[in-house]
Image (spheres, rainbow, N blue to C red):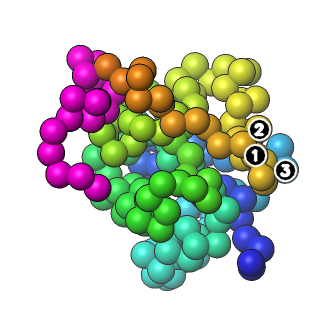
Amino acid sequence: MKPFDWDVFLSHSSVDKPRVARLAERLERAGFRVWFDRPNIDSGEDIVTAIEQGLERSRVLVLCMTKAAFESEWVRLERNTATFRDPGNHDRRFLPLRLDDCQIPATLRRLKYIDWRAESDSAWQQLLATLQPGAAPLPEVPRDEWNPFDPYTPTLGSSFVGRNG
């Protein structure tokens, strides 16, 4: 397997850029190679191609989840690329990081996210541990903990009737 040029690709909305830039700097100080659009796209370069190469050559895509991110076409493109590549996230190349009180789309609710809303030390330690090569995956939310009345829980409980697969 070809080694990655980047450890982390930070997918984010331009609205959240100042906060995500601080996260990028912190990750770089911790020794991670971070793909962050501003310094990694040269003037005159094709943006879509640069993003595509950044995604392909990054070990992990960190999705910085905010209301603005879920409204962004660029973030949707990046998220869809990562989830299409590995729908079950078996290769651990996709990590959701929650930055605000946004509503998480149903397709992402099955993945445990790191809560970065308060930027706590425990969240930082969890992020560092998760981003280490070969780190144990964040567990999926167990089906018996799903709550159909909770807007942040998938609704495909044991009583779901419909098309399989």
Asked if the residues shown at circle 1 and circle 2 are in contact, with their CB atoms under 8 angstroms apart, the answer is: yes
Percent x, y for residue 89?
53, 54
Name the residue located 28 percent from the left edge and 30 percent from the top edge: 158
Q: Amino acid at mark 1?
A: Ala
Residue 135, visible in the rendered structure: yes
> Would you name the residue on which mark 2 appears?
129
Percent x, y for residue 129?
76, 38
**Mark earlier in primary sequence (1, 3):** 3
> Would you name the residue on which mark 3 appears?
31
Q: Nearer the viewer, mark 1 or mark 3?
A: 1
Residue 103, visible in the rendered structure: no
Q: Count neighbours of disc 2 (C-alpha within 10 A) and say few if under 14, some if 14 to 19, many if 20 or more.
A: some
Q: Is residue 3 magenta?
A: no
Q: Quadrant of the N terminus?
A: bottom right
Residue bounds of the magenta highlight = 148-165
Front residue of this view, candidates 72 and 135? 135
Left of 31 or right of it: where is 85?
Answer: left
Whole-number angstrom distance, CA of label 1 to CA of label 3: 16 Å
Whole-number angstrom distance, CA of label 3 to CA of label 2: 13 Å
Front residue of this view, candidates 53 and 20? 53
Left of 108 or right of it: where is 98?
Answer: right
Which secondary structure type mostly characterizes the magenta part of the structure? Answer: loop
> Would you name the residue on which mark 1 appears?
135
Q: Which mark is residue 102?
A: none
